[in-house]
Image: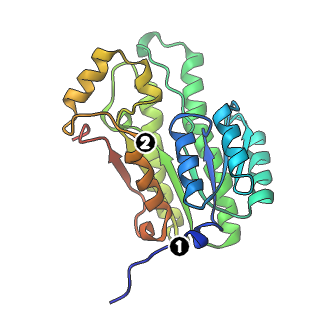
Amino acid sequence: MPSLVTEKKSEVSSKHLILSGGSKGLGLALSQYLLNRGYKVSAFSRHLTPEVEHLQNFYPNHYHFATVDNTSPEQLQQFCERAISRQGRIYGVINNAAVAIDGVFATLPEIEIEKMVAVNLTGALLLTRLCLRHMLVCQVPGRILSISSVVGTRGAKGLAVYSSTKSALEGMARSLAREVGSKQITVNVIAPGYMLTDLSSSLSPEQQQTIVRRTPLGRLAEFEDIAPLVEFLLSEKGSFITGQTIAVDGGLSV
């Protein structure tokens, strides 16, 4: 019987990840978690935060951060080139950058629709394409991972555009998994439930209580629920999983 795959921290340390939306919330927490596990992380966001500066000081040789507009192909290209020159070839990409604008769809301004599509979907497509081209040239296995949402599967009043962009990431994963599977590049999506950060911060206590009440496991999602799954899908242990959307929502989407 073959032995179970076990990756040592020294083996992980040569693996370089690109992460979008890394200045706060889940993206910041994932950066810190993966750096602690030994990965090299190149992250970007529109803004530099004190938390990012702390990571820069604490992980000077493994962490690279830049302010980037992920709707700009030129800025994304420049970021990836700098990241590769500093940290080496790209092993994986995590599409995390997103913006959610709540509003009744019939009256939602076009500029807000365009913003959500540009940041949540087009930006993810452009970044994935850049990283994928690099992986294919290097001819080595890789990982493509996108952060979706329970809203992409279940829907939510006032979030028609946001949910559309998240559902699209799931479609991309299924199709792209078929394209690049022969190259041993996996493509997956994690769909968290309502978390204690970001989107849930705009919800009233009553709305949060309603979500908790409708969730079989009786609470909101937390970072600690998401990070180990991200690590698993990035690892060799997750090498036979591709084209999947994995819900981490306490049963809310059941």
Q: Amino acid at mark 1?
A: Lys
Element under disc 2: helix
For this orientation, the residue located farthest to the top is: 107
Q: Is residue 212 left or right of residue 54?
A: left
Vertical relation: 49 (above or below) 136: above
Residues at discs 2 and 1 in contact (Cβ within 8 Å): no
Please name the residue shown 44% across and 14% down the image.
103
Q: Earlier in the sequence, mark 2 or mark 1?
A: 1
Task: Identify the residue at horizontal 45%, vertical 37% (top origin).
Answer: 166
Residue under numbered circle 1: 8
Q: Residue furthest front?
A: 58
Inspect the image, locate mark 2, and give the three-letter code of the amino acid beneath it: Phe
Quadrant in the rendering for residue 92: bottom right
* Any part of residue 248 in sight: yes
SS for dot 1: loop
Residue at position x 69%, y 70% from top? 138
In space, the residues marked 2 and 1 are separated at their CA atoms by 23 Å
Q: Residues within 10 Å of mark 2 (few under 14, many from 20)?
A: some
Occupied quadrant, residue 163? top left
Query: Which of 51 and 66 lies nearest the eye of the viewer?
Result: 51
Q: Residue furthest bottom?
A: 1
Q: Which mark is residue 223?
A: 2
Residue 234 is situated, as x and y percent measured from the top left of the image, at: 50, 61
x, y percent for residue 168: 46, 41
Residue 226: x and y, percent? 41, 47
Q: Which mark is residue 211?
A: none
Residue 241: horizontal and vertical position, in percent?
40, 64
Residue appearing at x 54%, y 61% in the figure:
143
Q: Which image quarter is the N terminus in?
A: bottom left
User: In the rendered view, would you say 72 is above or below 80?
Assistant: above
Total marks shown come to 2
The quadrant of the rendering that contains the C terminus is top left
